[in-house]
Image: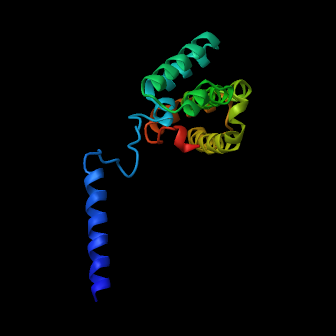
Amino acid sequence: MKVLLSLVVVIALISLVWFAQHANQPMQPATKHLHAPVISRHDILTATDFLAGIQQAVAINNQDDIDKWIFKAVEVAEAAELPIQDIQYIQSDLARNFLIFQAKRKLFNQEIQQAYYKIEDITPIKERYPEAADLFTKVDNLLLERNKLIQKLAAEMADGQSVDDEILKLAGDKWKQEFAKKVPKLDQESF
């Protein structure tokens, strides 16, 4: 029993000495506090004004303006102290090409919407934006449905007579007046 008591006293003394020596040392946090950026790479690359600037530059095929917008994005990323990998991605050809691709698809959608309501040929738009080739079938189907409505209106206006170009044009004008307001606006999500 004396041995056990002596052992407890020795352990207690060793503990006191150890705690006394380490009491003046500042405590180290268990984990390092990492700096989390306020903004992400995604936030920068999807900012409304940034995308609008890229789109405008793409619309007029101004490569210098595209580069200026990307430079501004890099400046924002650096100011936000994003990781170097994110900054390098924003500067990369991959990001640049993707931004141009997305801008062209958005321009395609806008021009298709205008042509849809104006009853214009969309072939030149398709030729200008091969980046949207996966949307062509869907757009063609929408136009086919619109054209069926116009044909139906033309048949009603012809009152049993054959439909000629003049009646077809009048039916198209009537469709623009009556139906264009009822048809939901086409947007990027429609495709």
Classify 99 as above or below 27: above
Where is residue 52 drawn, in percent x and y? 49, 23
Horizontal arrangement in the rendering, residue 111 relative to residue 39 (left or right): right
Give the residue at the far front of this rendering.
2
Residue 177 seen by the camera: yes
Rendered-image quadrant of the N terminus: bottom left
Horizontal arrangement in the rendering, residue 32 relative to residue 95 (left or right): left
Q: Residue at x 25, y 46 (%)?
A: 24
Number of disc labels: 0
Give the residue at the far bottom of this rendering.
1
Instruction: Using the image as rendered, state which of residue 6 and residue 155 is in the foreground.
Output: 6
Where is residue 185 drawn, in percent x and y? 48, 38
Classify 90 as above or below 145: above
Rendered-image quadrant of the C terminus: top right
Where is residue 68 drawn, in percent x and y? 55, 13
Query: Splitting the image into 4 quarters, where does residue 48 fall?
Result: top left
Instruction: Using the image as rendered, state which of residue 191 and residue 77 is in the foreground.
Output: 77
Horizontal arrangement in the rendering, residue 155 relative to residue 21 (left or right): right
Q: Residue at x 53, y 43 (%)?
A: 189
Query: Splitting the image into 4 quarters, where does residue 167 fall?
Result: top right
Residue 119 seen by the camera: no
Instruction: Using the image as rendered, state which of residue 159 and residue 25 is in the foreground.
Output: 25
* Colour basis: rainbow
Horizontal arrangement in the rendering, residue 32 relative to residue 102 (left or right): left
Classify 82 as above or below 10: above
Where is residue 128 drawn, in percent x and y? 71, 24
Classify 37 as above or below 76: below
